[in-house]
Image: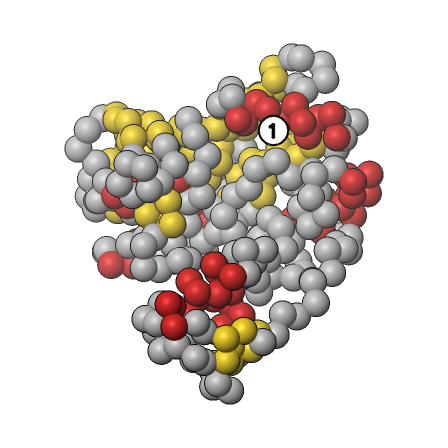
């Protein structure tokens, strides 16, 4: 039980709690408030509630979530595998690791069933996973099967020596044949679920290169290369350019003309991945063809029914 001191009159409830419970993130505290686990003088209030002073604040913190991940056998599209690393072609709709609303049916659980020894590699809820793709994005992911491979791949990602090439179908006709998007990306100031281009100093540096492959009346097919790996980077940068990814309702795709055929997930595919093998020190080059879900849409746009 905590008591609001007079000096905190006017403070937001979530910020006040964050200052006093430093071991809990503000996002975690906001979730507890939303779930009704924080009461102010017995009442459940919003995170933005302004305190008056003298209130008694009670917070109930549930026990930690079980970090054990159970293996779940699932068919995997494996592009490359040896005793150290694995590269998989993830389909759209598959969540990479457990999170809110996605406790089961994840790629991480399937990988654990395929290669049980990765259980001790990296985090317990994301064994072997050194980078991720959004649920509705398809394509290539490299997974470490040993601690040494994990450390080596993480270091390559940090050094920006991993080459990642994406194919993206976006709304509108992109004018420039190629370009570079350099804009910091951080948490959206008002919608904490989203990311956004932010002013200098309020986001992490992010660089995305693009090249036009094909133009249609209302759409453009791009090749996109990542130089950094921020959350939702391609989606945020292309939306800021005025050309959101087709199928991406979060960053503006729903406000544009609808594609001529339904699309499952985003029209965004991680098509190529190159890295130096962390043990053999030789380049590993992997490619994944455009999935049928996007190919059908492109065929329709080209007039091939």
The count of marks equals 1
Q: Residue at x 39, y 36 (%)?
A: 204
Query: In the picture shown, does residue 47 fall above or below 300?
Result: below
| Residue 241 in the image, given as x and y percentages of width and height | 23, 40
- In depth, the one of 248 and 52 nearer the eye is 52
Q: Residue at x 72, y 47 (%)?
A: 124
Q: At numbered mark 1, what does the secondary structure look like: helix, strand or loop?
A: helix
> Farthest residue toward the right?
117
- In the rendered view, does 177 fall on the left or right side of 142? left
Res. 153 visible in picture: yes
- The residue identified by callout 1 is 154
Q: Residue at x 45, y 55 (%)?
A: 264
> Farthest residue toward the front?
6
Location of the N terminus by quadrant is bottom right
- In the rendered view, does 149 fall on the left or right side of 188? right
| Residue 253 in the image, given as x and y percentages of width and height | 30, 54
Question: Where on the picture, by quarter, is residue 235?
Answer: top left
| Residue 251 in the image, given as x and y percentages of width and height | 32, 53
Q: Describe the colour scheme in one phrase.
A: secondary structure
Residue count near mark 1 (Cα–Cα under 10 Å), binned few <14, some 14–19, many ≥20: some
Question: Where on the picture, by quarter, is residue 283?
Answer: top right
Query: In the picture shown, does residue 70 fall above or below 38?
Result: above
| Residue 180 in the image, given as x and y percentages of width and height | 28, 27
- In depth, the one of 293 and 125 nearer the eye is 125
Res. 292 visible in picture: no
- In depth, the one of 237 and 263 nearer the eye is 237
> Farthest residue toward the bottom?
42
- In the rendered view, does 100 fall on the left or right side of 117? left
Q: Residue at x 82, y 43 (%)?
A: 116
């Amino acid at each position: 039980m905590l008591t609001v001191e007079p000096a905190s009159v006017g403070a937001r409830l979530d910020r006040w709690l964050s200052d006093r419970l430093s071991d809990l993130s503000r996002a975690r505290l906001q979730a507890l408030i939303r779930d009704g686990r924080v009461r102010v003088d017995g009442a459940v209030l919003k995170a933005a509630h302004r305190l008056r002073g003298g209130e008694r604040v009670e917070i109930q913190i549930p026990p930690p979530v079980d970090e054990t991940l159970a293996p779940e056998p699932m068919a995997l599209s494996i592009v490359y595998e040896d005793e150290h690393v694995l590269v998989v072609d993830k389909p759209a709709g598959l969540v990479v690791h457990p999170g809110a609303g996605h406790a089961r049916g994840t790629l991480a659980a399937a990988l654990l069933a395929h290669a049980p020894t990765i259980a001790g590699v990296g985090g317990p809820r994301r064994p072997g996973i050194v980078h991720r793709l959004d649920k509705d994005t398809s394509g290539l992911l490299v997974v470490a099967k040993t601690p040494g491979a994990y450390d080596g791949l993480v270091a390559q990602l940090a050094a920006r020596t991993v080459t990642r090439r994406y194919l993206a179908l976006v709304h509108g006709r992109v004018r420039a044949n190629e370009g570079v998007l350099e804009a910091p990306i951080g948490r959206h100031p008002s919608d904490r679920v989203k990311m956004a281009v932010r002013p200098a100093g309020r986001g992490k540096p992010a660089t995305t290169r693009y090249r036009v492959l094909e133009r249609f009346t209302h759409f453009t097919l791009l090749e996109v290369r990542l130089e950094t790996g921020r959350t939702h980077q391609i989606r945020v940068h292309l939306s800021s350019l005025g050309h959101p990814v087709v199928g991406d309702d979060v960053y503006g795709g729903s406000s544009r003309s609808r594609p001529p055929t339904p699309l499952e997930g985003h029209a965004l595919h991680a098509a190529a991945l190159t890295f130096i093998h962390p043990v053999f020190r030789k380049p590993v080059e992997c490619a994944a063809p455009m999935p049928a879900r996007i190919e059908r849409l492109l065929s329709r746009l080209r007039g091939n029914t």
